[in-house]
Image (cartoon, helix red, strand yellow):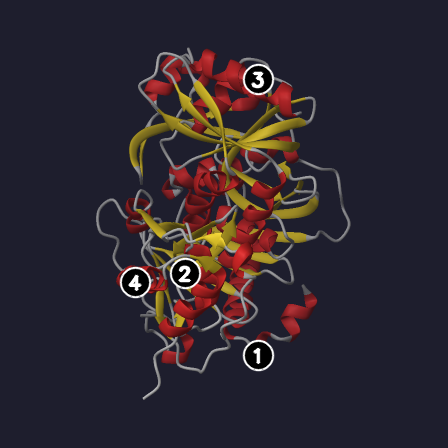
Amino acid sequence: MEGARANDREDAGLEYLAALRQRFRIATEARGTNESRIEIGGLSLRLRFAGPALAEVLLPPFEHLVAEESGEPDMAIDVFDVESTGVKPPPLPWPVPEASPGTQPVVRWSSEDACVLAAAGSGALTAAAPASGEALFCLRSVASVPLSERAAPLRDALQMLTSSRRLWMTHAGAVGRNGAGVLLAGRGGSGKSTLAVSCALAGMEFVADDYLLLESGPPPVAHAMQSTAKLTADSAARLGLGREAIDRAGFEPTLEGPYKALVEVGALAPGLVRRQLRIGALVGLSVAAVARPELRPVGPASGLRALAPSTIMQMRSRSATLLGALRELVGAVPSYELRLCPDPGANAAVIAGLVDEVG
Amino acid sequence: MSEPRFRIAAEIVHETVDGEVIAIDLGNGSYYSLAGSGPAIWELLGEGASEAQLGEALAGRFEGDRATIEAEVTRLLGELRENGLIAEAEDAGRAAAEAGPPAAEREPFEAPRLERYTDMKDYFLLDPIHEVNPAAGWPRPAA
């Protein structure tokens, strides 16, 4: 991280990052520093929060990854909010477009050594220097943390830092048994979260319902990020989850449409949240009007079509290399297509059978 | 005037797996599957081939009526251009017709098939990323 500072004058992105880092220091002087260490994808990550407010919201989903370390971390993310610290980020050198209702445009500026993302609507600001492993994240207020951020905290920063370490943030779930499992792929609304949670409720190991870090291997490995899942009211009801299982913020609108709420998978399935699973198959999901779940093998191209578009469109950085990593995955493990029926238990049983077969 | 050569458009990321090209348009969220003889054509387009070079290369590689092969190449090029998957190359390119396998070993020609998927497009429009182009000067979003 010291190397990045030496080059600040030569790289406008790094200059902005340095200015934001200075604001973070001022914020910590005002509110103190909350520091945590986690291990994610086999890498050590230092998280520092200016004051307790954002830490209380963004840290719990990483509880299963907490590590006891004190040396120099592989990656570091510093976080502050404007409202509780009274410190504003430096002005952006470009305009952020107004967000039309139901959209969340993002302005991205990439220099050689840094990338800055500014989201309209939420006002979230992420700046990262991937090579040096440093990122900063700033929000307007704790009250303005959107559901997407609480569900997958620090997603942009983590994606930028980990992709330069060949860990690919992938839009998929992962469940398994005895350390071996399958990836659950599909666009939003394809049933990933409901299936991943129903597998955990059925006693399977859980790594992710929506986003994970993929190490393409061999062997391919899915690494956990957050331990929360996002469910619709219909899914929660079909899984038999009572109000006590639902995050107190309740069901909130999402960018993609349906109202969803967070559930803490570690609380629903104690001892079953894992940091990683070796991946033995890829399953592309779709919700279908079928009485029983239908699983069938498909070719690697179908697997890539199920996994790659939503992953690439959401990550949208280092896209060609990311697609190459996903291509490696479908070349290494068999792909399947699963048409989901309305019965979560029946769907989970099919996945359990497949895990036993490929594990 | 020399015949135009083509290149894969800058907004497209692609991989070929199991005889099928998967191409994703980062500019609008559409993605595509290209099968049949499509991957062979795509590979040559990646090297800056012209339409005539494509026809010649495919006729040397596959068993089939040359006029049919050339007509299929023309049709696919139209589809690829219409969908923004390829553009005219500015440089000379590297593609040259290589000698194909002996006639007895050539595979039968299969017409290229392009399929377009737009189910990610809604997501793309909900969460667009505006790239700032430093070459054009701040604050100017990239075209």
Q: Secondary structure at mark 3?
A: helix
Quarter of the image where one finds residue B77: bottom left
Left or right: B38, with A300 as reference point: left
Foreground residue among B132 and A307? A307
Q: Is residue A347 above or below residue A278?
A: above
Q: Tag 4: Cα neighbours inside 10 Å, few (<14), some, or many (≥20)?
A: few
Q: Secondary structure at mark 1?
A: helix
| Nearer-N-terminus badge (4/2) | 2
Q: CA distance from mark 1 to mark 4?
A: 56 Å
Toward the front, the furthest residue is B104
Q: Tag 1: Cα neighbours inside 10 Å, few (<14), some, or many (≥20)?
A: few
Left or right: B121, with A174 as reference point: left
Q: Find disc 2 in the rendering and name its residue.
A: B12
Foreground residue among A126 and A168? A168
In front: label 1 or label 2: 2
Q: Find disc 4 in the rendering and name its residue.
A: B71
Q: CA distance from mark 1 to mark 3?
A: 55 Å
- Same chain, labels 1 and 3: yes
Horizontal and vertical percent position of residue B63: 45, 56
Q: Residue at x 34, y 65 (%)?
A: B70
Chain ID, mark 4: B
Q: Tag 3: Cα neighbours inside 10 Å, few (<14), some, or many (≥20)?
A: many
Horizontal and vertical percent position of residue B46: 47, 67
Inspect the image, locate mark 3, and give the three-letter code of the amino acid beneath it: Ala
Chain ID, mark 1: A
Q: Find disc 3 in the rendering and name its residue.
A: A352
Toward the right, the furthest residue is A71
Inspect the image, locate mark 4, and give the three-letter code of the amino acid beneath it: Ala
Inspect the image, locate mark 1, and give the three-letter code of the amino acid beneath it: Arg
Q: Residue A9, which numbered label?
A: 1
